[in-house]
Amino acid sequence: MIKKSYYLLIPQAHEVGSTSDIKKIDIKWIANNSNTMKIDNISSVGLKIPDKSWIIDGVVRTVDESRQNYYMTWIKDIRGEPISSSTNYLNTYNTQDWIDGKRVQLPVSAEHNNIDVLKGEQVLVGYPIYFDISTLGNYWWNDSSEIQVVPYYYALNLENKEIIPVDAYFISDDEYKPVNIHGLVTPNWNGSGIYNYVIELDWLAESVRRNYTDTEKNITDLLRGTYNEVNYKADPEAYYDPGLDSELNIVAPRQLKAPLGSSYILGNAQLLKADGRARTFIGGETTYGELMNLGGSYSTIEDEHGRKYNPGGRLSDYLWWESAQRWHLKLGLPSSTVFIRHGQEPTSETIKEFDSNIKDNDYVVLCTADIRALGDTYVLKYDHKGNNGKVKVKRKDGRWTEEIILPDSIPPVIAIYSTTKTSKFDVGIVGVH
């Protein structure tokens, strides 16, 4: 059986003086196709530097982006076991030591902020949501696999708890243009009907924040080289280009794809489709800290890639490493985004319906995602049947809602967005002349 898991981080913003840094919540969401979900990481660990090093004086310290502080999670790990010290928490294969520590339950909501003064401040639209999806199985063979993510947005009425599908528009050239239309993506969708608000992976800038450790890097680099050779030896014609002369086709095969550079296009605000340029490897020979590659010691016999193995015992180590992958992804909307009821056109009246700055309005927006892993055999979809989380929200008059159980009739809920302001309100102008 091929299983699927994923996890996500949210959000990252490092504008000096940005209030979004105050509620900087980095989550890692890990789940599988057995209707369980886990998330790891809320907020980073402060740097070991003098107290005077603040981003926001007296409120938000400068942080070490490579170290986790909290992680958000569901009640079970990617193998369906209750999370505990006996499961090595979420470090299932002993290749991600940073997935340890204090746990907070999904979804991302301001109530979980570890800075008291900001517990009522929801995530602001305009800041990106970093997330990683982990897959179990051969989601790498011949670079034929991909991850598809379709974001869906819903307005949540804090008075009567009604949940309303919404479309997202933003201002460009003094007019509203659609960036996410509810239900637009279908199997035959050709990409039309929306503004192409591009979402990119900047690996050079993001790899540290995404906890890409030396262990994961070494595994990924080795597998890229290994399967450069494997695919070529198994199928010498795999990379044959009939458009080239035969002499030009006698070249070294390309390696497996992996993240690199600063500008890999993941997709747009309507649909992400990521291939191996967003994938690293996280498999290991141990599960929950116990060696699973049993059968005796490695012998001096080497396989075709120079890895020692025992024909009657252990498998080559890379066969375990390749079995689990991470896909490094991102969601986002423009800072001028407005939400309107699905199917309506943006007008001066329709854009007011979910604006909580209007006297009688009190809404938040649920950011959800339909997530699918496409392999060479299966297409797996994740859902939250019976487990889509719960939230308490501070209303604009200062009162807190009772606990709101989020229904599993909508896609997995990732984060709660504010409807009173967006990230553009974090930008200030000082000393201009």
Image (spheres, rainbow, N blue to C red):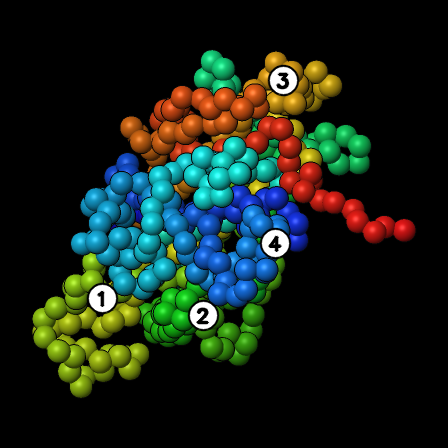
Q: Residues within 10 Å of mark 2 (few under 14, many from 20)?
A: some
Q: Which mark is residue 255?
A: 2
Check disc 2 and report its element: helix, strand or loop: loop
Q: Secondary structure at mark 3?
A: loop
* Residue on which disc 4 sits: 55
Q: Earlier in the sequence, mark 2 or mark 1?
A: 2
Q: Identify the residue at image location x=19%, y=77%.
A: 309
**Gap between marks 1 and 4, in whole Å?**
41 Å
Of residue 163 and residue 192, the one placed in the foreground of this image is: 163
Residue placed at 22% from the left, 66% from the top?
285
Q: Amino acid at mark 2?
A: Gln
What distance separates the C-alpha of mark 2 from that of mark 1? Answer: 23 Å
Is residue 287 in view? Answer: yes
Of circles 3 and 2, the one toward us is 3
Tell me which residue sits at (40%, 34%) in the image. Answer: 412
State which tag comes first along the sequence, 4 or 3: 4
Q: Which residue is mark 3?
A: 353
Residue 254: which numbered mark, if any?
A: none
Question: Mark 1 is on which residue type?
Answer: Glu
Residue to which mark 1 is pinned: 285
Q: Rounded to the nearest whole Å, what is the CA distance between mark 4 and mark 3?
A: 35 Å
Residue furthest to the right: 433
